[in-house]
Image (cartoon, coloured by chain):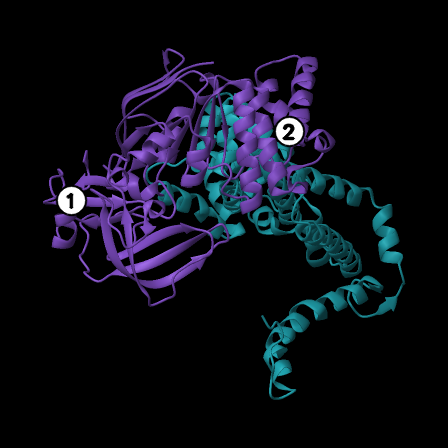
Amino acid sequence: MANVTLRNVRKTYPGGFEAIKGVDVDVGDGQFCVLVGPSGCGKSTLLRMVAGLETVTGGEIDIGGRVVNGIEPADRDIAMVFQNYALYPHMSVYNNMAYGLRNRGMAEAEIRTRVDEAARVLELTSMLERKPRQLSGGQRQRVAMGRAIVRQPKVFLFDEPLSNLDAKLRIAMRVEIRKLQRRLNTTSIYVTHDQLEAMTLADILVVMNGGQVEQVGNPLAIYEKPATTFVASFIGAPPMNLMSTRPEEIRSQLAGSAAADAGILGIRPEDFVITDQTPDGGVALPLTVEAIERVGAETFVYGSREQEEQRVAATPGELPPGEIIVRIPGTEAPAIGQKIRVAAVRAKLHLFSADGRTRLEA
Amino acid sequence: MQKQAIFQSKLLPYALVAPQLAIVLVFFYWPALQAVIQSFLLQDAFGLSTSFVWFENYIDLFKEPAYFEAILRTFFFSFAIAVSSLSFALLLAVMADKPLRGSMLYRTLLIWPYAVAPPVVGVLWIFMLHPSLGVLSRYLRALGIDWNPLLDGDQAAALIILAAAWKQISYNFLFFLAGLQSIPRSVLEAAAIDGARPMRRFWTVTFPLLSPTIFFLLVVNIVYAFFDTFGIIDTMTRGGPGKSTETLVYKVYTDGLLGGNLGSSAAQSVILMFMVIVLTGIQFRFVERKVTY
């Protein structure tokens, strides 16, 4: 059991490339922290720095009240689950799990107890004598988990552990990881690029971009009040609709708010309603339906605005300029080519400064 | 993907493989056949009469204690050359595998000795270790070692092993380096997190994962020590002093070309041929089995 605290952590490679530009995160005892961001944002590097596999070139990493910057991975009392599982291919499942305990000189009887217990929890008991190559992807993943839990470390580190699994298994394992973590109550740091995984697993969500933290907090709080346009478009699927407030059409509707003159307006697809009325203080937009996606429980309507205005910030996961996604329940949808009017209430509007870096309160 | 090429003419494919086949036939099958025939013949000392003697050459060979000594000696040489060359190459490869500046340069330099022809290797080591000319011999004597491989059979054997192993290090190094680089980094990182110190990591993870490479190289090195050391032995010791560095291959040469006993020499080379076939067979079976752990 331990807190993990990162204080102004930096990583500069010898070539001068700054991978991590000063990160501050505080993960409480037993909490599940998820680092999420697009590829190349530095999230894996940060995790590897916590593990001790990458050197820290600035700031402090503190695990359980001890600064571990110069300490070997073996002595940090952490366990890590790798994306490719990194199982020892020449060892049986049992030996894979026992290896870390043997290295620490634990008695064979105690090792047997711990491995058997972990195997029982992970439903691997019948596979203890098999080699990794005789296992399926999901089973290998569980062995990697088992190898981490037998050690009973202070901190679990997960480096995109589910990205090599198929979609169905990924959801099942996601739930399993969360249940296991709750039961063991071990502080965990989990890296993923999948915002759905991030939302469902995290106690604390850290959204990263370009080696910096964009926002830290409770996942729902981040979803409801994204601090920047990057977070707004990265968290939530389909992404938030972002548009400039400069066109007269929008500016007039936002009159009196902080972002009315020059800024960015964001509205989540699910906050739009197809209606002819304009809610008081809300925003209404005329759209031409371009495409319809029916996924069963809900339908996505892709529409284009008549007035096409280039948006200011270009961030990953963003929609092409002028395109708006509306998410409506059920399968009833307007026809392609039809002109509709969508509206969102005042409370569901997100306003940002023109550079997208600051959230403005309406 | 279509694996079979389609030719318009039926003769073209034969024409295309003909040069290769001709070379193999003329330079391998023909001499091999000659050796097999020769091994059943006995020729008088002047080459005037030849008689067919069935397996007499072979029987004589196995009655000769010197032949068994040569077999034992060859096995010992092969073992010593393979072990010393493999272990030193592995050490170098492990060190070269570390991501350091200029690694491309020293990796390339380490591969160079492989391009040196065996007789040149022999000459090179003679220059260093010849009892009266050698650069290193002086220092050895200064250390109180009575260094004279021209008279001392054990020292001569050590010299051959040294030179032969040295030449093979580059080849082994190349394979070890490739083998090391194919071990996923994350597996070693997992072992580091699992509390294994570098030495333990090497013996419990790296070494077992390299075992396919090690086995492959062991066979290659034995074949090398059996057959390709001829040039080194010929330039350095000529099988001497006495017969202390006479391996099976060198004995084929001395008995046949120097001793004039062509029948026995041919019988010996037929036996060697079978050894090569067996070793190559082992190697092929092994290469087909891709995963061994």
User: In this figure, which residue is indicated by the disc labeled 2?
Assistant: A122
Amino acid type at circle 2 is: Leu
Q: Quadrant of the C terminus of chain A?
A: top left
Judge whether B68 appears above or below A213 on screen.
Answer: below
**Of the pair A197 and A344, the residue shown nearer to us:** A344
Within-10-Å neighbours for mark 2: few <14, some 14–19, many 20+: some
Q: Which chain is cyan?
A: B
Q: Which chain is purple?
A: A
Residue A197 quadrant: top left
The answer to whether any part of residue A223 appears in the image is yes
Q: Chain of mark 2?
A: A
Whole-percent x, y for residue B137 in the image: 47, 31
**Of the pair B97 and A65, the residue shown nearer to us:** A65
Q: Chain of mark 1?
A: A
Q: Is residue B132 left or right of residue B273?
A: left
Whole-percent x, y for residue A187 in the image: 46, 20
User: In this figure, which residue is indicated by the disc labeled 1?
Assistant: A254
Whole-percent x, y for residue A170 in the image: 54, 41
Give the secondary structure at mark 1.
loop
Q: Is residue A52 left or right of residue A278?
A: right
Point 16% across, 42% down: residue: A355
Whole-percent x, y for residue A56 in the image: 31, 25
